[in-house]
Amino acid sequence: MSNLYFAAYGAVLFIPLFLGWRSVSKHSGQAPLPPGPRLLPFVGNAFDIDVSRPWLTYANWKEKYGDLVYSRVLGQHIVIIGSMKVARDLLDKRSAIYSDRPVLRTNEEFGISFNTAFLPYGDTLRLHRKLYHHALNAEASAEYHDLYIRKAYQLVVDLLGAPEEMEKYLETYSGSLIMAATYGYEVRPEGDPIISCAREAVEIAKKILAPERAALLTAFPFLGYFPSWFPGAADRRLAPYCRKLVRRILDEPFEIAKEKITGSGRPSSIVAKFLSEDEDISPAQEEFMKGVAISAFVGGTETTASTLHTFMLAMLLHPDVQSRAVAEINAICGDSAPNFEHRSSLPYIEAICREVLRWQPVPQLGLPHMTSQDDVYEGYFIPKGTTVMVNEWALSRDERIYPEASRFDPQRHLTAEGKLKDGPVFFWGFGRRICPGRHFAELSLWAAMVSILSTIRIMKAKDSEGMDISVIPEYTAGLTSQPKPFAYAITSINSRREEQMRAASRVE
């Protein structure tokens, strides 16, 4: 049964709803709440939101009410940010107030409360981020250049060998790269048990972390105690199974990483760097490190694969962009396969990376922030405990920053002289919640995109009469978003680079 039905059943519980309504109908201070849609008694805006694509509802509200919109769902204050300026003003400049997270009982129940992304703001999060900074800062991420390139070359070889399995190989690239860097673990080409286990756990987590469900359970935590037979609570039956999956992916790759620690001069895995900080690691410290390590894997795998899927779609729809990219690569690399030594000389490839991230943000809504105290912004009162959503879709379509924002155009990130601009970036998050693995992610995306562009052309598929099959971009909904399946064809455009990549990908 849908989350709306779940909300409806909660709405009939009159007494707790009445108390919730009373608690939000008044606020301290004399400043008004931000503008927003009309609130119905008790339920607020619970039935106004398109739960499958809430970012579109929020974008419509932005057009009516402005860049800061107030909403309420069953007693829970919600503020939606719809512009870069407001996001910077609140999440960056006032990060001490806007860095908390809603705490949901379901995170504990499903075994995922350890994840860095879900931690409330405090000492545990600060320690997580300290470890991330040590292992994944810009300098540390650059140590893995050879790994990015080897995995990217393998991706090209796989795509040419079985082009019909594009989505599978994009997922394999992102998963195998992060597993190798995090644990020193080489993923099996087919049916890797750890990857399969992790993907299953992620799919369950995506179901229980839908934005509207998060808002509902934040407002009324007692709903999380309803038995699994209660309408709308059936997903809770998966909780014991999910905990088993999570336990496995916490333990198995970590033990592999411990076994692989050596005195070689090769870059250490992230886990090896964690463990090298202290020779005497307690069980509690080890459990903590397991959580940090698997958070890096879970946080990066699906977002990287989804971004690359959008990249392939964008290249199919814009052959002129492909042609310009190939010309730039040919001019700099000749017939050599590109690598990171060429990166600074390939600004158009960098511009493509940025435009892919802007054009179709993988999380259309960033993970919710929560205020840790009352605040007043531009005359509007924002209460303590307010869920704060950044509508990344609206930011990506802001015509004030991105003219003709719906158009895919890498040139918008370049100056007239062809140099990269220092433009605004929203896709890595804001403030103290900015993605700690963003440097690693940027390098892995660049390696994959430049390798594909240098060696492969993705084109429209032909029907039985030899005519192009048209493609209309469609995206999945949920916590993350990626293209729905589309028709395409793939061909090699440089046999010399292809052979270099085959040779390099065979080297372990």
Image (cartoon, grey):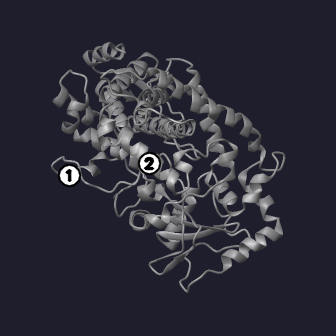
| Residue drawn at point x = 36 percent, y = 26 percent | 152
**Mark 1 or mark 2, which is nearer to you?**
2
Residue on which the image places disc 2? 129
Q: Residues within 10 Å of mark 2 (few under 14, many from 20)?
A: many
| Residue drawn at point x = 68 percent, y = 42 percent | 110
Q: Is residue 437 shown to the viewer in this render? A: no
Residue 177 is labelled as: none
Task: Decide which of tag 1 and tag 2 comes sooner along the chain.
Answer: 2
Residue 415 is labelled as: 1
- Return the residue nearer the eye: 328 or 426: 426
- Return the residue nearer the eye: 143 or 22: 143
Q: Is residue 362 left or right of residue 347?
A: right
Q: Is residue 48 left or right of residue 334?
A: right
Disc 2 secondary structure class: helix
Residue type at mark 1 is Thr
**Considering only vertical position in the picture, is 204 above or below 367?**
above
**Considering only vertical position in the picture, is 288 above or below 489?**
below
Q: Residues within 10 Å of mark 1 (few under 14, many from 20)?
A: few
Q: Spatial distance from mark 1 to mark 2, Cα to Cα?
A: 34 Å
Percent from the top left, x then y, of residue 333? 19, 27
Percent from the top left, x then y, of residue 352? 32, 41
Percent from the top left, x then y, of residue 82? 47, 64
Tell whether label 2 touches label 1 (CB within 8 Å): no
Percent from the top left, x then y, of residue 494? 27, 19
Q: Is residue 217 shown to the viewer in this render? A: yes
Quadrant location of the C terminus? Answer: top left
Judged from this view, the residue extending furthest toward the bottom is 30
Judged from this view, the residue extending furthest toward the right is 229
Disc 1 secondary structure class: loop
Residue type at mark 2 is Arg
Residue 6 image-quadrant placement: bottom right
